[in-house]
Amino acid sequence: MSTPTETIIPEIDEIVNFFTPELVEQIAKDLGFVQRESTLGGIEFLSIMTYGLFSQPDATLNQMSAMLKDINEALEITASGLHQRINQSGVEFLQKMLSAALDLSSTKQIDESIPKLLEHFQKVHLLDSTQVPLPDELSGILKGSGGDGSESGMKLQLMLDYKKGVYESIVITDAISADQKYIDKAVEHKRVVNI
């Protein structure tokens, strides 16, 4: 199987290559996304939903099917065949891959010298957000800033337990929600949980 790494932004290439193809396929099978020798495997689906859609966010199913051919020359899948695979099982597979990537990346971020400074604290939480523009058609679900920006967008709010290297929560809000508003909710939630 070939991957079009020369044509893809390095950060996206790194996300997909974070895992071995064997691990991706095992996760796809464990979740039931791949149930037998399927035409479309987990690695191709992950690649098209990251590589493909990052390089061409408004790609049609026909264009995505053509891109899949670049990822795996032996793959034969029609636009309608791909459409059938974009279902709840596909969503669960992508969620699991994101969760696994976050778990692996968080452990890489822990500096061995820092925990000594923090040994008196039971937990240290880091909270960060990233904003993602979405197609304008989703503005009824997730509001964007509008104007020169997209009418639709979302923020991913991530809370990391720094001492353990584990993401405790991932919350999706619309793009116009103020980070400070979410921080207040997150702090209050941690207080309630820890009482």
Image: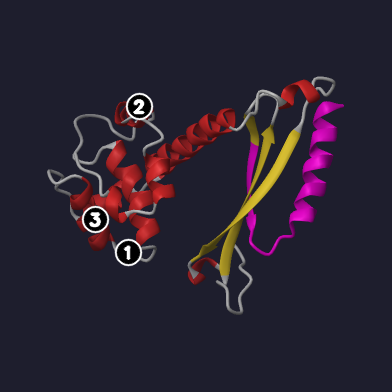
Dot 1 corresponds to which residue? 59
**Separation of disc 3 and disc 1 at Cα?**
10 Å
Q: Is residue 127 magenta?
A: no
Marks 3 and 1 in Cβ contact (< 8 Å) = yes
For label 2, the crowd category at 10 Å Cα-Cα, with few meaning under 14, some 14 to 19 and many 20 or more, is few
Amino acid identity at mark 2: Leu
Q: Identify the image quadrant of residue 131.
A: bottom right
- Quarter of the image where the C terminus is located: top right
- The residue shown at (58%, 28%) is 107
First reached walking from the N terminus: tag 1 or tag 2: 2
**Separation of disc 3 and disc 2 at Cα?**
23 Å
Residue projecting furthest to the right: 195
Dot 2 corresponds to which residue? 23
Residue 65: % across, % down: 22, 55
Residue 49: % across, % down: 37, 50
Q: Secondary structure at mark 2?
A: helix
Q: Identify the image quadrant of residue 158.
A: top right
What residue range appears in magenta?
Answer: 169-195
**Is residue 143 shown above or below 43?**
below
Residue 146: % across, % down: 61, 75
First reached walking from the N terminus: tag 3 or tag 1: 1
Dot 3 corresponds to which residue? 67
**Separation of disc 1 and disc 2 at Cα?**
27 Å
Q: Is residue 184 magenta?
A: yes
Q: Is residue 140 visible to us here?
A: no
Amino acid identity at mark 3: Met
